[in-house]
Image (cartoon, helix red, strand yellow):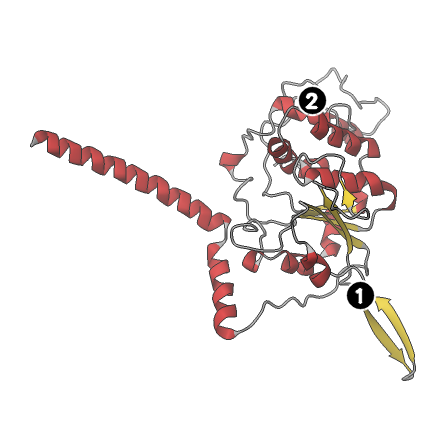
Amino acid sequence: MRYAVRFAISAATILTVLLFLLEQHLEDIWDQYNVPAFIHFSLRNSFHNSTLDYTFPSLSQAGDKVIVMAKMEHEDTDWVEENLPEYASHSLIFNFSIVLTIPSSNSWQHAIYTVNPSNRTSPYALTTPLNKGHESMAYLTYIIDNYHSLPLTLTFLHSHRSGFFTAWHTDTPLHDNVYALRALQTTFVQQNGYVNLRCNWNPGCKIIHRKNKHVTREVWQEVFANTSTSPANMSSHDPSPPFNYPGYSSTSSAADNEAALKAQYIPTEVGTACCAQFAVSRDRVLQRPLSDYKRFRRWIIETDESDAKSGRVMEYLWHVIFGMEAV
């Protein structure tokens, strides 16, 4: 009898622990997937036969923005042209006879890269040098190939439009990238320089995520070596004399020297809202020389890290590359 009681107590304890862990996991998914909003808009559309309102005030120059995207050959990205057209326009009629057609502020340039081309791929399709690093290879290839003719606003997106499981990280009702792009305030992108398209900190930016297992000290040094923000081998952030760090000049202003010192830091924490969908201004991109972007792409190609791991590293570094704090 005593053994049966012990067994029952042990089984109940184990079951309680498992249920607790399951509850924690489900709460995390509930938050990450923004389940309440998804259910709300799904039910509204189902019972009221309505759709999301995609009408937003125009805050950008017509056509002076681009969607950069990586896709596998089998993936269907027609939704981009259908909903975010490259040649959207509208007409103005004067004196009932003169018609002037001008580009619409809803028009986007498209740069969609096929990362695994085959003999069936169109010769006119954009392709990447290698299928590695997930979307980062396409992102960097676009910047490198167009560095001297970039539009004002660059938006980097995944190839899926929506879906609860495939696009859960798209931080909009129904996880819809069309909604995200039509709601994008490009004037804010210009002001801020860099904007993550996901506001939810989970996953990627919560305190428990900031001791980043992907961006280690060694990886940070590898990625930023020989770039304009090449890290020094510093063990602390103490800016005490002697002032012999790279970039220091006795004739420079204190602000310039502080910026040069800051560039040498290797942070102990790195965090950003997932998942490598963001917008950046042309001016912010041009704050780095072209050679930096070539160096980043070369790291992806040459590193021993896998396709997934190198892509994850870049996911956690885009905000740093474009001038934001490590967290």
Q: Residue furthest bottom?
A: 96
Give whichever of 300, 242 is nearer the camera.
300
Left or right of residue 10: residue 88 = right
Q: Which residue is mark 2?
A: 239
Q: Is residue 323 visible?
A: no
Give whichever of 32, 254 is nearer the camera.
32
* Residue 180 in picture, x, y percent from top left: 64, 57
Residue found 48% across the figure and 64% down from its top: 40
Q: Which callout, 2 or 1, points to the residue nearer the camera?
A: 1
Q: Is residue 97 visible?
A: yes
Q: From the viewer's perspective, is residue 270 above or below residue 198?
A: above
Left or right of residue 201: residue 108 = right
For mark 2, does the 10 Å Cα neighbourhood hold few (<14), some (14 to 19), or many (20 or more) residues?
few
For mark 1, does the 10 Å Cα neighbourhood hold few (<14), some (14 to 19), or many (20 or more) residues?
some
Q: Which residue is mark 1?
A: 104
Name the image quarter holding residue 53.
Answer: bottom right
Q: From the viewer's perspective, is residue 76 above or below residue 264?
A: below
The amino acid pointed to by label 2 is: Pro
* Circle 2 SS class: loop
Q: Residue furthest front?
A: 119
